[in-house]
Amino acid sequence: MEYFLAKESVLKWLENPSVYHIKKDELYELDDEAFEFLRSCSAGKGCRSNDKKSIGYCAKEGILSREKSGLKRPPIKKSPVPSLRYLELQITNRCNLRCRHCYIKDKPGKELSLSLITKVLKEFEAMQGLRVLITGGEPLLHGRFKEINSILPDFFLRKILFTNGLLLNKKMLGNLNINEIQVSIDGMEKAHDSLRGKGTFRRAMRSINFAMDSGFEVSVSTMVHQKNLRDFNKMENLFKKIGIKDWTVDVPCVTGRLRENTDFQLAPKQAGKYLVYGYGGGIHSGEKGFGCGLHLMSVSASGKISKCTFYSDRAVGTIKNGLRKCWGKIKPVRLDKLECSCEHIEECRGGCRYRAEILGNAKGKDLYRCVSYKTI
Ligand code: SF4
Ligand code: SF4
């Protein structure tokens, strides 16, 4: 019986050789033997092995399939260390909302061209990237979104669309070449609308339902703010009930538009305890010995490249310099260089470095996280 590498699976050489199941968002680290075995399965004649146990396991996990995909796969080259796994790609900073906590620093109206987006995706794939997070502004407002959508299937990446949900409709969902949709929900109706505008909660929830009915995985991101503090249990029940994949909860940094909206700002003691909510994987994580964003980089709508969106005004380069070169300039945060020694450091990893900086010390504590760990 012949088996082939499933069309949703791709070999990636990160810190270790691995296979990534794009649809399940599952990464499996491999030893050299397993890697060579799976490499043989991606060739035209199927797996060169009679190891029924391994084949059975891989077939059960959806890594192997009886179907010959015929897809042209990208070359496997060792990635830099640390590996660049997640890329925030802000294709436009145009938006149809004026949220009161928005942190976008560039003047509105910037958009990446289709050729620059293609270049970035090619380079990210060649660097063995896993997830591209297509963001804005509102990414669906990009003037050439249809064409961007049409090139997405060419890339062996998990594509996640970050949206406020206002423009999604059944017809559009039927054509989207996306694996996951992340919608912002900042509280139950009253609290969400106070931050994002009247009627936005209902429209966003309707889009979530449409997206789920159309078979997309849906995740939610929520900002803790003055008006949604009583909603967290309700949100948790709702998101679990309807099957939200990941729920990201964060406190917005006091930057951008939030500086003027003081009625939405919260002190660490008020907001930190809500950071225990949320579930699922994230993109801001570190690893043993390293702080946040170890595998993350961000491209802004003006082509600037930085550690994450918050550092867009301290870019390490631009798309024209190339992703690999820019990645080499981003220094990972080392936990032993931080001024926060506490028993939770390996779990907390020093929280958000940008938030610590806004609080007054880039190497100091992220007091919001400290509250969630009850260390202050
Ligand atoms: S600084 Fe904050 S937003 Fe940026 S990668 Fe770290 S945790 Fe994420
Ligand atoms: S809980 Fe506070 S002190 Fe401890 S690692 Fe996190 S930010 Fe640093």
Image (cartoon, rainbow, N blue to C red):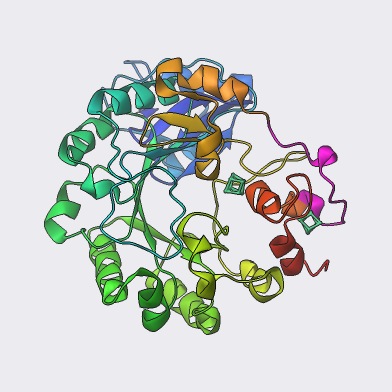
Q: Nearer the viewer, residue 12 or 299?
A: 299
Using the image, determine if residue 259 lies above or below residue 92: below
Q: Nearer the viewer, residue 312 or 273?
A: 312
Residue 319 spot, x, y in % from top left: 41, 23
- Judge from the rendering whether residue 72 lies leftward or rightward of residue 355; answer left or right: left
Residue reaching furthest left?
Answer: 171
Residue 328 spot, x, y in % from top left: 60, 20
Looking at the rendering, in which quadrant would you find the N terminus?
A: top left
- Judge from the rendering whether residue 287 lies leftward or rightward of residue 246; answer left or right: right
Q: Start and end of the magenta stretch? A: 332-346
Query: Where ligand 2 lies, by quadrant?
Result: bottom right
Q: Residue at x 62, y 19 (%)?
A: 32
Can residue 48 be seen in the rendering of this structure?
A: no
Residue 343 spot, x, y in % from top left: 87, 56
Using the image, determine if residue 257 lies above or below residue 239: above
- Judge from the rendering whether residue 284 lies leftward or rightward of residue 111; answer left or right: right
Q: Dividing the picture into quarters, in which one does residue 320 lie?
A: top left
- Judge from the rendering whether residue 69 lies leftward or rightward of residue 169; answer left or right: right
* Residue 340 lies in the magenta-colored region: yes
